[in-house]
Amino acid sequence: MANDTALLPVVAAALVDADGRVLLQQRPAGKSLAGLWEFPGGKIEPGETPEDALIRELEEELAIMVPHACLAPAVFASAPLGDRHLLLLLFVTRKWTGVPRALEADALRWVYPRDMHDLPMPPADKPLIGLLDALL
């Protein structure tokens, strides 16, 4: 059976600090899913690898630089998103240059994975919490 649903590949990062907390950002007012907490990242542009897209997004959103070699593929999520289907690739990194700043989000928060269950998060991010907790 043919399916005309467009696939939307996106990348996100679990930035892990020395205490095992992960950085989440709050989606800004005026955007879809405003107010929800999410892993930083975004869409993969045509011609980009997932890693290159994530490095670009982290620089644009948080003003940090992450070396390509420090991005470890972790888990993925697949979820319907309107007339498209979201494929979310989550990478883990413990090394970056710079101090994360909320350039495109309303706020940033360092959270232990076990505490993410209590935060409002997008549907595609929720299934990643348990897996991320087990990895860390």
Image (spheres, rainbow, N blue to C red):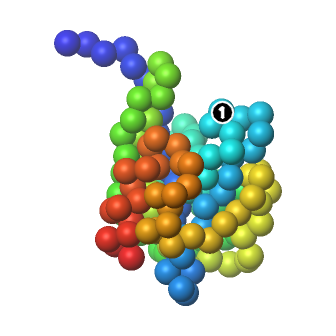
Instruction: Give x and y (percent) for residue 65.
Output: 67, 70
Question: In this image, 88 relative to 60: left or right?
Answer: left
Residue 73 can be seen in this image: no
Give the residue at x 77% y 52%. Answer: 106
Q: Quadrant of residue 67?
A: bottom right
Left or right: residue 22 versus residue 109 is left
Residue, x 20% and y 12% (percent of image)? 1
For the C terminus, which image quadrant?
bottom left
Q: Is residue 3 placed above or below 106 in the rendered structure?
A: above
Asked if residue 82 is positioned above or below residue 136 in the image, the reply reads above
In what element is the residue under mark 1?
loop
Residue 34's spot in the image, x, y percent? 69, 39
Q: Which residue is mark 1?
A: 32
Question: Which amino acid, mark 1?
Answer: Ser
Name which residue lies at 55% across and 87% down: 18
Residue occupying the far front of the picture: 118
Question: Callout 1: few (<14), some (14-19), or many (20+) C-alpha neighbours within 10 Å?
Answer: few
Relative to the observer, which residue lies in front, 119 or 132?
Answer: 119
Q: Is residue 119 above or below residue 46?
A: below
Residue 116 visible in the shown view:
yes
In this image, 80 relative to 15: left or right? left
Residue 78 location in percent, x, y? 36, 40
Residue 23 horizontal/vertical position (percent): 60, 67
